Amino acid sequence: MKQNSFSVSCEEPHGRAKLFLKSSIEKLLKIILPPASATNYPVNLKPANPNDSHVNRDLAGEYCTSGLKLWDLENYEGAIIDFSKALEIDPEFSQAYLLRGKVKQIAKDYNGAIADFNRSMNIKPVAEAFILRGLARFHIKAYKGVIADFAKALDLDPQWTTTYQKSTVELIYHRRAFSKDCLGDFKGAVKDYTKAIQTNPKEAKAFENRGFSKHSLKDFKGAIEDFNKAIEIEPGLGHAYYGRGMTRIAMRLKNDARLDLLKAIELGSVKAKEALKNLNSKS
């Protein structure tokens, strides 16, 4: 796996994008299919077998509605129990698998979430299921799967980037870009970070991450521009100073690089300390 030589290791996929992604997961899942309190909840809570006399459609729907209310109250364990009861009544209830999978993902049971998304896809393959599975795969570092799932979602629904809210689209592009970055596809990463930036031009971490990818492509001028923009948007982004400092070292601008690394250290960057020590030893 080819990685940036000076970036946060992709072995911690939440590294460069950690705070951005951690703060967004539950919000994103609620955007894609909101919980019960949402006024425009889009899921049709009808079990899959309306003509099957052995399926109590009303009871399955009631359990699903109860699960949604518990999810809204952040009672995730209770929500999973109720979605499971709905599925015991109707094992072909694809949307119940989606909902249970999302709650499992919020609870950080990523493999359990993936299993539920797989079951939902087997019944009814829809774009949401692939997007959700891609998000879960990101957390277990299955980066090839992330990219494949988002591509499949686009095949199933070419308009998905306009169907969902901008914050959803931005996060999806950011995760796909990060996955490509970790796999060494820096050109592909730059393209996806650019799409994330086009969706939200005020997201500092997208500029920061694109700067690292551009550095890996030896586009040092472009990397500096991205780090500058990230710092302009969010002056306390220590890793952007670290990235800019390392890029300036590559450009043989050692004095400027030293200032950036000192600022990164001030803002808490551990890697900047090691980089500054190496820089000083060569001076």
Image (cartoon, rainbow, N blue to C red):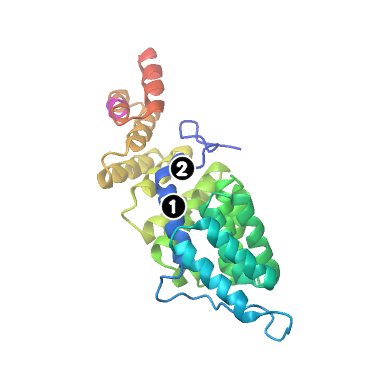
Position of the C terminus, as image quadrant, is top left
Task: Read off the residue under disc 1.
Answer: 193
The tally of labels here is: 2
Residue holding disc 2: 213
Check disc 1 and report its element: helix, strand or loop: helix
The verdict on residue 251 being magenta is no
Answer yes or no: do the residues labelled 2 and 1 have beta carbons within 8 Å? yes
Q: Compare residues 238 and 242 and report the one nearer the observer.
A: 238
> Mark 2: which secondary structure?
helix
Mostly what secondary structure, the magenta segment? Answer: helix
Residue visible at 44% across and 65% down? 31
Instruction: Please tell me which residue is depicted at 56% across the width and 75% down the height of the picture.
Output: 62
Return the disc, 2 or 1, that comes first in the chain's sequence.
Answer: 1
Characterize the local packing of mark 2: few (<14), some (14-19) or many (20 or more) Cα atoms within 10 angstroms.
many
Specify the quadrant of the image occupied by residue 240: top left
Most extreme residue toward the bottom, as rendered?
51
